[in-house]
Amino acid sequence: MADPAHDLVSESIPHWYGGDSDDVLSLVDGDGVVVTDDEGNEYLDFNAQLYCVNAGHGDERIVEAIREQASRIAYVSASKHNDTRTELASRLAEITPGELNDVFFSVSGSEANEAAVQFAREYTGARKVLTRYRSYHGATYGAGSLTGDPETRNAVERYAAMTGAAKFLPPVAHRSPFDADSPEDLARQAADHLAYVIQQEGPDSIAAVLMEPVGGTSGAYPAPADYWQRVRDICDEYDILLIADEVITGFGRCGEWFGIQTEDVVPDLLTFAKGITSAYVPLAGVAVHPDIAAHLRESGIDVGQTFAGHPLACAAGVAALDAYEDGLIENARARSDHLEARLRELEAHDAVGDVRGRGLLWAVEFTDPETGEPFLHPWVDDGDNPVRDVIGETQERGVLVGGGRPKTQIILSPPLPVTDAEIDRAVDAIDSAIASVF
Ligand code: PLP
């Protein structure tokens, strides 16, 4: 009998990102948007290592901040205050939307989402959490159940599942589950569908709706205008909390500090990870509305993790925020139009079915030119997937891009200091890779 644990270990080998296992890159150096492998080959890192290194590689300001912190005091437990941790929390309070001024630190995006769910449940006294089918919220037992991507969710739920994790349909326009004739119609239909799901699940049983402001690994899909406002209104109507998962979309990725700020809506809780330190040291957390924070303090809920808010990570976080403030978010906003314009040129390929994104987070989705259908069942990649070949051929041309889930797309998320010239080189490489595969 197949050993399921073995299957999981095999899946964690990054075949998808590097072609065959023999081809998996070993990266040893990085500078800005460029990374170098152990044979001295350079690549433009248009995935920012899983959407993490927003400030770019080798930023001396972040490195120096970590060094300085380590030389003073490397670790202070969460039961004590620490000046760097306090500074980062107050800096975050300044930039988070609305009044989300109370910060709870954790270590990874999965744990941040689980903490947010725990807080929402404690505050509302309700258990269910609604998330979208096209979503990724993590791979631990709880966050894996929240995730819509069936590959992750089913791998996790083979063993255990978070109770009360229910799903609803995403407002995607390409291969849409809705039959909408305009973005406005899509926003309305998708929001009406959410209201229907809430009524069927029982509004009083639902603690929160959890969504990524722009879908991340599941396809860099922005919501149609007005969708988020409609969802906010529905949550208010039924007394359900709204949680924004900003693990990918935070820290300049979509051209603002947080992706939700491109929607002009304020959530009740906001989770973050990755870009908070540009991944120089792991750090994540939840920004919480003060009413919720006050309730949690009163209820005496006392949960935390040893490495949450680690001072080295907080030092990296403060320095990363400085770097974002010092022109990087502005650059992300300024480069976005050029990236979009260049990616739209790829639509000339019959195999390119859709190009979409926001800021510096974009997806190119492929389609079989013969049939107009996806090449493969989106969730079953038996190795014979031309999109995988596009990723490999792009790498051969010196550019790293991400693979999405479903695996019918590639995702681009360059570090924020990217230049127009680097965008040109990357898109030229993708263009040539597509031509070589199809
Ligand atoms: N949420 C989103 C939107 C993500 O993209 C991810 C990871 O990619 C997570 C949560 C989980 O974060 P982590 O892998 O740090 O647990």
Image (cartoon, rainbow, N blue to C red):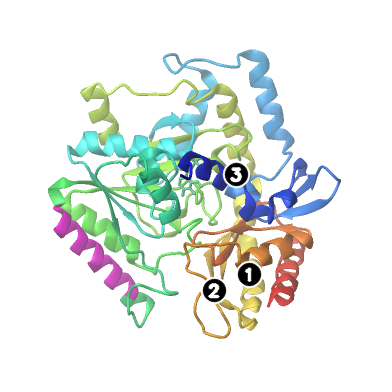
Q: Which residue is mark 3?
A: 325
Residue range of the region highlighted in magenta in the rendering: 186-202
CA neighbours of label 3 inside 10 A, class few (<14), some (14 to 19), many (20+) = some
Residue at 45%, 43% in the rendered image: 139
Residue 421 circle label: none
Real-space Cα separation, disc 2 to disc 3, in angstroms: 42 Å
Q: Is residue 292 above or below residue 66?
A: below
* 322 shown above or below 194: above
Residue 115: say if magenta: no
As drawn, the label of residue 386 is 1
Q: Which marked residue is nearer to the observer: mark 3 or mark 1?
A: 1
Q: Are marks 1 and 2 in contact (CB under 8 Å)?
A: yes
Q: Residue at x 41, y 53 (%)?
A: 212
Q: Amino acid at mark 2?
A: Phe
- Mark 2 = which residue? 375
Of label 1 and label 2, which has the lower sequence position? 2
In front: mark 2 or mark 3?
Answer: 2
The amino acid beneath tag 3 is: Glu
Q: How far from the left and from the top, in percent, is residue 389?
A: 67, 66
| Mark 2 closeness class: few <14, some 14–19, many ≥20 residues within 10 Å | many
Q: Is any part of residue 149 visible from this angle?
A: no
